[in-house]
Amino acid sequence: MIIKNTVDNGDSVKIELTGRLDTVTAPELQEVLIPLFDKAKTVDLDFTDLVYLSSAGLRVLLMGEKTAKAKSATMTINNVSGEIMEVFKMTGFDNVLKIK
Amino acid sequence: MISDKFMIDHSTLEKNLDRVENMASCYGFAGKELLQIRLLAEETISVISPTLELSEAWIKMSTDDNSFSFTVDCDAGNDALDEKTKATLMKIGGASEQKGVFGLIGKIFDFLTVPGADYSAVADHSLISSYALGGQGLYGYYFAPELIDVLPEEKKDDVKSDAPDDKTANMEINIVEGFADDIQVKLLSHRGDRRLAITVKKDFSKGQIEGIEIA
């Protein structure tokens, strides 16, 4: 399971991820993340326990960002490890996603 | 030198990536570099994934005193290219506008889908004689990145954009070229059947354990 915990406060949702966001687990995140923007104005993804991110995960994150923009909502990624930040920088996604 | 080889397909991807990671771990890779090796394998397989519709692909791993490498070996069609195979290979050819090694791979697949294309004219012939002497009718071509300029290509309009959608087209390529220490591309032809081999290498850094033997 990629999702460790979800805190839903109506307008604001926080999702804690764990393990690997890759070809196998990305569909699970997509299934949970995208529908959130029907109601939530703020979605925070906590990457504290995420150790691995591949292009499959990047696609889902990009989908989330585009959905958020379309619904006038905000998606933020927090507590990114150095290794995952390298992947974001290498692919230019550090300029596309909101990363804290 | 230790090596291992196994077949890959869409359904066993995670198990195969675990196998790559486990072998790298046995040779002293750990932490960040171990995850990078797994990532390199996942993204390289992702680049060639359309060929899995044609036939199986293989991963061969090997290590020496200085590096760990894996080779992804996949179907590159044959001389009697049918329309379905051509359409499948052209999905990889779509990357031909990219720079670097994976742009080269895209151009090779573009080239392969042209009827009657003679890639021997643009490849480095240094491997051909060694394969031919083996007497098995196997011919190999090594495509050095600097040979890319001599491959025929249509002129296309320059499209420059930082739009997010453009970034998704480059993701796998940027990740592999960013983390790998070396990448080689070879095209092998045997009795009209062709296979593409992409070798990705990761060098050992200081402090890694060497000389671990696997029973």
Image: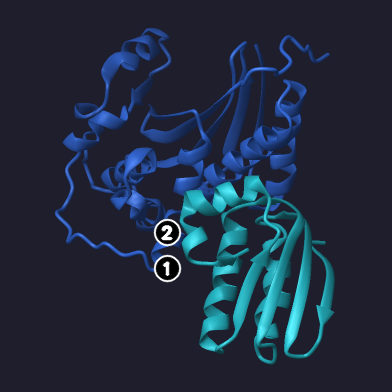
| Residue occupying the point 47% across, 62% down | A95
Residue that badge 1 annotates: B165
Percent from the top left, x then y, of residue B199?
49, 29
Task: State how far apart marks 2 and 1 are (Cα).
Answer: 7 Å
Residue B206 left/right relative to B198: right
Tell whether label 1 touches label 2 (CB within 8 Å): yes
Please name whichever residue, B195 or A21, is drawn nearer the observer in this view of the structure: A21
In this view, the residue in front, B215 or A78, is A78
Residue B62: horizontal and vertical position, in percent?
62, 20
The residue at 33%/49% (across/down) is B98
Q: Name the residue located 44 percent from the left edge and 34 percent from the top edge.
A: B195
Residue B36 coordinates in the image, percent (x, y): 62, 38
Q: Colour of chain A?
A: cyan
Foreground: A21 or A45? A45
Colour seen for chain B: blue
Question: Mark 1, residues whose alpha carbon is within 10 Å: few (<14), some, or many (≥20)?
Answer: few
In the image, is residue B168 above or below residue B40? Answer: below
Could you tell me which secondary element the residue under label 2 belongs to? helix
Q: Is residue B190 visible?
A: no
- How many labels were placed on the picture? 2
The correct choice, above or below, for A82 with respect to B138 in the image is below
Amino acid at circle 1: Asp
Q: Which residue is mark 2?
A: B169
